[in-house]
């Protein structure tokens, strides 16, 4: 189905809900599908200088993973478990590793690139926010939803989405400070590992926040 042929203009979230393949293509074009999911799709494409029809054709042309789960219809308890296992648990391991790398690279190479201390600080701010954020989700919001009280979760949902917005801003700051994760020729192994880790973190957080903002939260508030 061509989303652009419908009378209502689709949002980025509408396109992202088509699954992992869609989010992979959006990520490739750096179209924000998590915090910016409510933006009209054609407007978001224009901001990135790409044709929305081409983006949709790329999505249609990609091969879906055979075991892909449709999280728009799967039980909410399964979606919550997926978020915890696929995103929360790895993050708790990855954030300390990246923090150590960020501190080391800023300490050793700040004279070569004066933006590195600011990048370190932005990452540490992100990590400091994400850890308690995940705790609040697991201890308050997720049990609320799985317990069948999603219709009354408006307050916690708004609080979590506000924190998602702030995390999205820090991700954009990290990308700006790193020149889109472009490595200088003299970059050492630690610098390379940091850039690779941060770029992977960005992709995972976009997918993570998309599942919560655009699928879990709306379904829970509808009482599904």
Image (cartoon, rainbow, N blue to C red):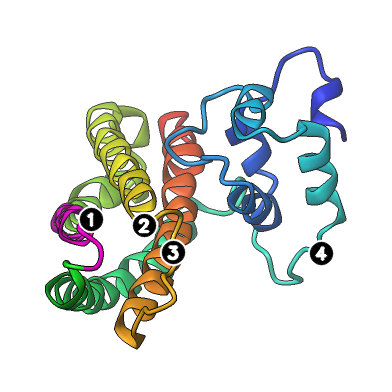
Q: Which of 66 and 12 is in front in this view?
A: 12
Rate crowding at label 2 as few (under 14), some (14 to 19) or many (20 or more) other CA atoms within 10 Å: some
Asked which secondary structure carries label 1, the reply is loop
User: Residue 199 shows which numbered tag?
Assistant: 3
Q: Nearer the viewer, residue 185 or 27?
A: 185
Q: Nearer the viewer, residue 207 or 189?
A: 189
Would you say 57 lies left or right of 41 here?
right
Asked which secondary structure carries label 4, the reply is loop
Q: Give the range drawn in magenta.
A: 112-129
Rendering coords of residue 109 (x, y %) = 20, 73
Q: Which residue is drawn at 45% across and 44% down?
A: 216
Disc 3 from disc 1: Cα separation: 17 Å
Residue 81 figure quarter: bottom left
- Residue pointed to by mark 4: 63
Residue 44 figure quarter: top right
Furthest residue toward top = 7
- Residue pointed to by mark 2: 178
Which of the marked residues, 3 or 4, is nearer the chain's N terminus?
Answer: 4
Mark 3 touches mark 1? (CB < 8 Å):
no
Rendering coords of residue 208 (x, y %) = 43, 54
User: Residue 139 shows which numbered tag?
Assistant: none
> On screen, 7 above or below 90?
above
Disc 3 from disc 4: Cα separation: 23 Å
- Residue pointed to by mark 1: 115
Query: Can see residue 85?
Result: no
């Amino acid at each position: 189905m061509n989303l652009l042929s419908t009378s209502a203009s689709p949002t980025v979230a509408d396109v992202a809900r088509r699954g992992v393949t869609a989010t992979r293509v959006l990520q490739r074009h750096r179209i924000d599908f998590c915090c910016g999911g409510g933006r009209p799709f054609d407007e978001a494409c224009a901001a990135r200088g790409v044709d929305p029809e081409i983006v949709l054709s790329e999505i249609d042309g990609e091969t879906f993973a055979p075991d892909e789960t449709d999280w728009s219809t799967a039980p909410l308890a399964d979606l919550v478990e997926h978020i915890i296992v696929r995103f929360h648990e790895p993050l708790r391991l990855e954030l300390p590793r990246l923090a150590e790398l960020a501190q080391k690279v800023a300490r050793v190479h700040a004279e070569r690139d004066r933006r590195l201390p600011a990048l370190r600080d932005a990452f540490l701010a992100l990590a400091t926010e994400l850890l308690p954020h995940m705790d609040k989700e697991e201890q308050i919001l997720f049990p609320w939803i799985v317990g069948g009280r999603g219709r009354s979760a408006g307050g916690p949902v708004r609080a979590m989405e506000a924190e998602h917005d702030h995390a999205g801003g820090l991700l954009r700051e990290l990308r700006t400070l790193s020149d889109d994760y472009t490595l200088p020729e003299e970059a050492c192994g630690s610098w390379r590992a940091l850039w690779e880790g941060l770029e992977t973190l960005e992709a995972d957080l976009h997918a993570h926040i998309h599942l919560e903002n655009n699928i879990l939260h709306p379904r829970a508030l509808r009482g599904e």
